[in-house]
Image: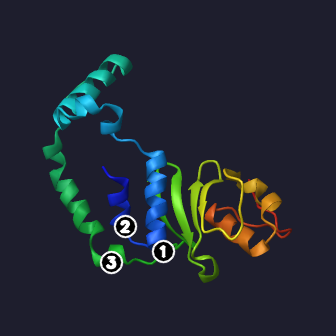
Amino acid sequence: FSPAMMAQVRAGTQEFKRAFAESMSRHLVTLGELRPASYEKGPTEVMHGLAQFFAQEMGAERQALPWNRWEGVFAQVGRRLTRSAWLHARGYRPPYHQVKVREGIYLRQPREEAFSGIIAEVDTENKMLTGLWNSPRALPLPLRAQTLVDYVPDLEFRRVLGQLLDVPLSNSSSIVTS
């Protein structure tokens, strides 16, 4: 798995692709990086080794999966999810473009033209900025939503960062965290 290759096939600007590759490199690890010697033996050996580890360390039971009984369901769901009506259905559109890096970590870019060059790595669980590219202001990272008011005096920029963190501004221009 190559984070650089994965980022290059993603839609977006070259800057967004570079930020995505950098974020993946920080947050993801491959089996080859963890156990290069066993990875060279091939995927079957790696899967066997992982199954053995889970059985010994976690008490998991090894059993064959009956994939064939799911083939019809997979085909049906695949057809539904690739229909034009599904792909182009109206619905909620967040104020940012995003790509998931890993569970709880997203790369987001505002749709708003004035701030569209900004790219933020967001920890959604902790409501925190963990990376920021093309920011008009240097900010200490990681930066929690509730401290934005302390570090971002520009109300419009603070509002956009709040949107990227999914936290709105209150009437007093501070971030609402519940």
Which residue is the site of mark 3?
Answer: 85
Q: Which mark is residue 91?
A: 1
- Given residues 41 and 81, the one toward you in this image is 41
Element class at badge 1: loop
Q: Are marks 3 and 2 in contact (CB under 8 Å)?
A: no
Q: Nearer the viewer, mark 2 or mark 1?
A: 2
Within 10 Å of disc 1 (Cα), the crowding (few <14, some 14-19, many 20+) is few
Q: Tell me: residue 114, above or below residue 130.
A: below
Residue located 32% across and 17% down the image: 56
- Where's residue 85, x and y in %? 32, 78
Q: Mark 3 belongs to which amino acid?
A: Ala
Residue 118: image x %, image y %? 59, 70
Give amino acid for label 1. Gly
Q: Which residue does the numbered mark 2 point to in the structure image? A: 10
List x then y, in percent, for residue 148: 76, 59
- The x, y position of residue 15, in whole percent, is 48, 69
Q: Residue at x 18, y 30 (%)?
A: 45
Q: Closest to the observer: 102 or 34?
A: 34
Q: Can you name the residue that lies furthest to the left here?
A: 68
Disc 2 to disc 1, how far (Cα)? 22 Å
Q: What residue is at 37 percent from the left and 58 percent from the top?
A: 4
C-alpha span from label 3 to label 1: 12 Å
Q: Is residue 141 above or below residue 116?
A: above
